[in-house]
Amino acid sequence: MRALVQRSGKSSVTVNHEVVGEIDQGLVVFVGFTDGDSIEQIQYLAKKIVNLRIFPDDNGVMNKSILDYGGKILSVSQFTLYANCSKGNRPSYIEAMNNHEAIHFYELFNEELRKYIEVETGEFGADMDVRITNIGPTTIWLER
């Protein structure tokens, strides 16, 4: 399981010219799954994400989590996090979990996040237009 977490201002996901998820501030989380991932890993990563201290405190130091700072999470499924480019210029996605299982894991991941905070989502498997205002910029790579 991999997640790319970005501290965000206004961000949104559009599918077929319709906004399906948007936030004004918080985190944009791109998440991908691979064979062997488990519910325990989902629980661990969701808790890790909501407790990441990457928001500024009163002194401007990144010392607050999204739970302290406020905002929402915009969760976007992204199988390309498992791209392997070691053999040529065309990425292989063989390490990404198949769609049937991955959609279930994505839904479980979002349910786990919702135990802590409000979550907006993209649309699994869709061609999405993702617009992000990356604040900082702050981008964190997490893998479990």
Image (tube, helix red, strand yellow):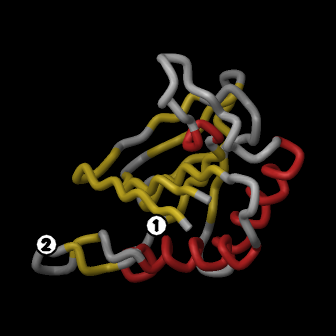
Q: Residue at x 42, y 73 (%)?
A: 66
Is the residue 124 above or below the residue 9 in the image? above
The answer to which image quadrant residue 128 occupies is top right
Residue closer to the observer: 51 or 98: 98
The answer to which image quadrant residue 26 occupies is bottom left
Residue 60 marker: 2
Quick one: SS at disc 2? loop
Is the residue 100 above or below the residue 142 in the image? above
Q: Amino acid at mark 2?
A: Gly
Camera-nearest label, 1 or 2: 2
Residue 141 marker: none
Cα–Cα gap, marks 1 and 2: 18 Å
Local crowd size for mark 1, using a 10 Å CA cut-off: few (<14), some (14–19), many (≥20)? some
Quick one: SS at disc 1? loop
In which quadrant is the C terminus drawn? Answer: bottom right
Q: Residue at x 59, y 42 (%)?
A: 82
Q: Residue at x 38, y 53 (%)?
A: 8
Q: Position of residue 19 (x, y in %)?
A: 64, 36
Q: Amino acid at mark 1?
A: Gly
Q: Position of residue 5 (x, y in %)?
A: 44, 57
Residue 71 marker: 1
